[in-house]
Image: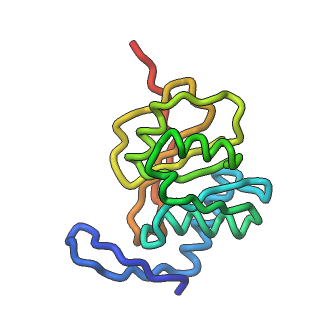
Amino acid sequence: LAYVIYTSGSTGKPKGVLISHRGLMNSICWYQDAFEITPLDKTTQLARIAFDAAVLELWPCLTAGASLVLVKPEIMQSPPDLRDWLIAQEITVSFLPTPLVEKILSLEWDENIALRIILTGGDKLHHYPSGLMPFKLINNYGPTENSVVTTSGLVPDYEEG
């Protein structure tokens, strides 16, 4: 047993989900490979620890020897402040909840920044990145029982016309 995380699933009634070491290790190895996590990376920890996305913020980063940077809650309240913080901290990979990523996508971004990947998941994505984003947007989905992520894909740029 690696950890227990509680989910309400489709019933709305909390239940403990037991995640094995094998499931956790599979997720860690997949994440590090898929997003090329190295000791040179600086990643964020934004998700609440009770949300299973926090598992993939913590363990792939730490086991790769990358830096994990904690975000002050007040920065997350302002998308422009969060953007500026991601740039100033030279973050390379970050998870953002879907409602927050949709707000981030509407902002202007400099071309030459360290941020190369933003991951999102948990809700339906209603907005797509413009071709001007200097990072890739990845949408992840999976039930807690599957060790966080079952499917993952690059979100294509929105093209008018």
Q: Residue at the spot x=57%, y=61% of the render?
A: 45
Nearest the eye: 99 or 148: 99
Q: Position of residue 160 (x, y in %)?
A: 41, 16
Q: Is residue 142 above or below residue 117?
A: below
Q: Position of residue 57 (x, y in %)?
A: 58, 62
Residue 7 position by quadrant? bottom left
Position of 117 compared to 105: left or right?
Answer: right
Q: Is residue 130 above or below residue 126?
A: above
Q: Residue at the spot x=66%, y=42% of the render?
A: 87
Q: Residue at the spot x=57%, y=66% of the render?
A: 27
Nearest the eye: 29 or 120: 120
Q: Position of residue 60 (x, y in %)?
A: 65, 65
Q: Residue furthest bottom?
A: 1
Nearest the eye: 150 or 132: 132
Q: Position of residue 113 (x, y in %)?
A: 70, 36
Position of 64 compared to 54: left or right?
Answer: right
Q: Is residue 115 above or below residue 12?
A: above
Nearest the eye: 71 or 139: 71
- Colour convention of the picture: rainbow
Q: Residue furthest front?
A: 74
